């Protein structure tokens, strides 16, 4: 929506304008912007044997990215995080788009009830969701096997969360189950904004609802799909709670579920015999920042611009 | 094609559509339902008939009794409520003030400030945790709810300012001009005229601020992990870590955490969706 810019000249009301802006700007700067910048600064320092912090340049980055012990852990968590993200992009967002498309069909009954129920898992805490699925997938309880039995797939059941080969993918699916509500809500809202006459014209010309969705509605909501994708990216590379709740800070078995967030936590606070190190922790956080920044810039300059042009 | 055929086709399509929606609704709700019903069963009932509803033989509240006896759930709820409510009130007030200034007054650097305040929508505040912890330690606020409120206010402001600025652009000009002609001061225009007008946007902002705070594990774990200052999410996480083999207690603690959020959600879901789709003016 195009709107005119601010109207009133502030010189008539200097004091009120400053009083309106100062509290929010100060708290936001002190507890968000300053810590982000200070974390980057801290990543260039180290405290050898508990003494004063000294400037070490890029040494911490060299340690994390090139030291044989650290680099294997770092790249393991990076690629695990990429897999985690890939599952969300390939499963969560298509399901969300499809459900939003179905929910926006004209004259659908119980539309609001379906929508309210489907979004419910999104409202729960990630920790609670992690524990719910840990119980359901537990071989001790056996509910998971019983449920698969209903659809005749009992033989497939196994201790998925406990096996190195399947734990990460299982956790990704748990996360998808919870967060489908986000693409569902945002794309549904975008679909509702499409003018009726556009759709009606196509229907009168004999197009099916499926054709209308693929050829008319979906292209129109592509900017929202792109926004959902970048939100997914930022959310996934910032994830921590689910892995920590289900697998602990060690992200087992054998680090197979380790992602950037759990690596950051372990580096910062330490675990078992390894001591925590705030400077190495800040280095991991800065690397996460760079990854997220790269994603956001890619979205802003490569995707959003092209889509905006397409819309014209 | 006759009308009867079209109607039959419509009916069969409706069946398919509802079958898909019902299936997914079941996928979304059944896991939650399963945990809640089993929280009201005896240990035997949980393992012998996990999918059945609690009946005369299997009904039991022993899980809840254990949770309430061994853990301080009332306190955790109180902590979560306090942090969430105080944060929402501060975020709404400060964000409304800032959004008003950004949308109403022409001053140098207006656009730059709006962009600066929007950085936090995309960059997660967690990445500054090392420095936030230093700051909280320096301020002597470790293990206090104040520490959580300060961080959550900073976390909630960017999106709240963004949504409210968009909303305030829609406030009719005549309203403000009339007030100014009557010589009403700038502060009074905001507090007496503008603030009451943003009520429709408040629900949306409140939900988007509240859900991530109520559900957060990271900052309670780092800034307030003990001393009876745990939030409900951290409290459940610590409790389950301790009683992991006690199925009654685990299921009951999960249900205690789930039920209040579900009730709140059912009350506010309509406003949430309305707020999200309010941009969709047909």
Image (cartoon, rainbow, N blue to C red):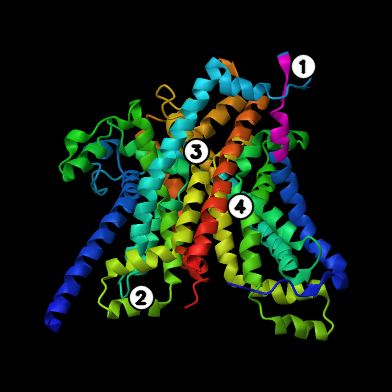
Spatial separation of the CA atoms under disc 2 and disc 3: 42 Å
Q: Nearer the viewer, mark 1 or mark 3?
A: 1
Q: Quick check: do tags 1 and 4 share a chain?
A: no
Q: Magenta includes A109?
A: no
In this rendering, the answer to whether A280 lies above or below A301 is: above
Residue located at (83% from left, 67% from top)? A16
Q: To which quarter of the image does residue B18 belong?
A: bottom left
Is the residue marked by circle 1 packed among few (<14), some (14-19), or many (20+) residues within 10 Å? Answer: few
Label drawn at residue A241: 3
Q: Which residues are magenta?
A: A37-48
Q: Residues within 10 Å of mark 4 (few under 14, many from 20)?
A: some
Chain identity of mark 4: B
* Circle 1 or circle 2, nearest the eye: 2
- Judge by depth and name the residue closer to the eye, B69 or B255: B255
Q: Are marks 1 and 3 in contact (CB under 8 Å)?
A: no
Q: Are marks 2 and 3 on the same chain?
A: yes
Q: What chain letter is assigned to the residue under label 3?
A: A
Residue hosting label 1:
A51
Circle 1 SS class = loop
Q: Given this view, does label 2 or label 3 mark the residue nearer the observer?
A: 2
Q: What is the C-alpha distance between the residues marked 1 and 2?
A: 69 Å
- SS for tag 2? helix
Q: Nearer the viewer, residue B178 or A1?
A: A1
Measuring from the top left, give residue A3's x and y in whole percent.
64, 74
- Tell me, yes or no, whether dots 4 and 2 are on the same chain: no
Residue at 58%, 36% in the rendered image: A288
How far apart in space, not on screen, are marks 1 and 4 (Cα)? 37 Å
Drawn side of residue A113 relative to residue A66, left or right: left
Residue on which the image places disc 2:
A199
Q: In the rendered image, which residue does mark 4 sit on?
A: B121
């Amino acid at each position: 929506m195009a709107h005119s810019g601010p109207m009133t000249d502030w010189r008539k009301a200097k004091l009120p304008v400053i009083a309106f802006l100062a509290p929010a700007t100060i708290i936001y700067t002190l507890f968000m912007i300053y810590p982000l910048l200070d974390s980057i600064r801290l990543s260039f320092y180290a405290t050898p044997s508990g003494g004063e912090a000294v400037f070490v340049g890029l040494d911490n980055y060299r340690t994390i990215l090139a030291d044989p012990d650290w680099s294997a852990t770092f790249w393991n968590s990076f690629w695990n995080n990429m897999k985690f993200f890939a599952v969300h992009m390939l499963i969560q967002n298509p399901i969300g788009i499809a459900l939003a498309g179905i929910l926006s069909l004209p004259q659908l009954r119980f539309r609001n009830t379906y929508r309210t129920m489907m979004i419910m898992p999104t409202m729960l805490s990630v920790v609670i969701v992690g524990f719910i699925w840990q119980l359901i997938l537990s071989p001790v309880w056996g509910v998971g096997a019983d449920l698969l039995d209903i659809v005749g797939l009992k033989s497939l059941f196994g201790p998925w969360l406990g096996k190195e080969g399947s734990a990460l993918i299982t956790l990704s699916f748990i996360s998808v189950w919870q967060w489908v509500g986000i693409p569902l809500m945002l794309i549904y809202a975008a679909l509702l904004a499409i003018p009726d006459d556009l759709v009606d014209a196509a229907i009168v010309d004999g197009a099916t609802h499926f054709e209308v969705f693929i050829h008319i509605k979906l292209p129109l909501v592509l900017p929202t799909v792109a926004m959902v994708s970048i939100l997914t990216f930022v959310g996934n590379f910032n994830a921590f709670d689910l892995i920590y709740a289900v697998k602990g800070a060690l992200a087992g078995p054998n680090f197979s579920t380790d992602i950037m967030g759990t690596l950051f936590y372990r580096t910062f606070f330490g675990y078992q015999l390894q001591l925590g190190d705030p400077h190495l922790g800040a280095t991991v956080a800065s690397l996460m920042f760079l990854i997220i920044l790269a994603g956001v810039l890619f979205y802003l300059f490569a995707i959003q611009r092209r889509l905006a042009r397409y819309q014209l | 094609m006759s009308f009867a055929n079209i109607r039959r086709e419509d009916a069969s399509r409706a069946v398919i559509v509802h079958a898909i929606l019902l299936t997914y609704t079941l996928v979304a709700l059944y896991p939650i339902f399963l945990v809640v019903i089993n929280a009201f069963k005896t240990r035997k009932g949980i393992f012998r008939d996990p999918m059945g509803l609690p009946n005369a033989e299997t009904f039991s509240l022993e899980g809840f009794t254990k949770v309430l006896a061994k853990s301080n759930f009332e306190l955790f709820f109180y902590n979560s409520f306090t942090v969430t409510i105080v944060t929402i009130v501060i975020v709404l007030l400060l964000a409304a003030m800032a959004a008003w200034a950004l949308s109403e007054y022409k001053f140098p650097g207006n656009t730059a400030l709006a962009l600066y305040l929007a950085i936090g929508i995309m960059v997660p505040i967690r990445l500054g945790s090392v420095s936030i912890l230093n700051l909280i330690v320096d301020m002597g606020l470790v293990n206090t709810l104040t520490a959580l409120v300060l961080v959550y206010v900073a976390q909630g402001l960017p999106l709240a300012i963004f949504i409210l600025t968009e909303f305030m652009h829609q406030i009719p000009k005549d309203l403000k001009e009339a007030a100014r002609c009557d010589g009403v001061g700038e502060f009074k225009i905001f507090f007496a005229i503008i603030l009451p007008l943003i009520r429709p946007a408040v629900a949306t902002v409140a939900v988007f601020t509240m859900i991530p705070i109520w559900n957060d594990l990271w900052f309670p774990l780092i800034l307030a992990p003990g001393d009876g200052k745990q939030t409900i999410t951290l409290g459940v996480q610590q409790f389950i870590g301790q009683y992991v083999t006690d199925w009654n207690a685990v299921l009951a603690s999960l249900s205690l955490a789930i039920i209040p959020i579900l009730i709140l959600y059912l009350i506010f879901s309509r406003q949430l969706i309305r707020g999200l789709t309010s941009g969709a003016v047909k």
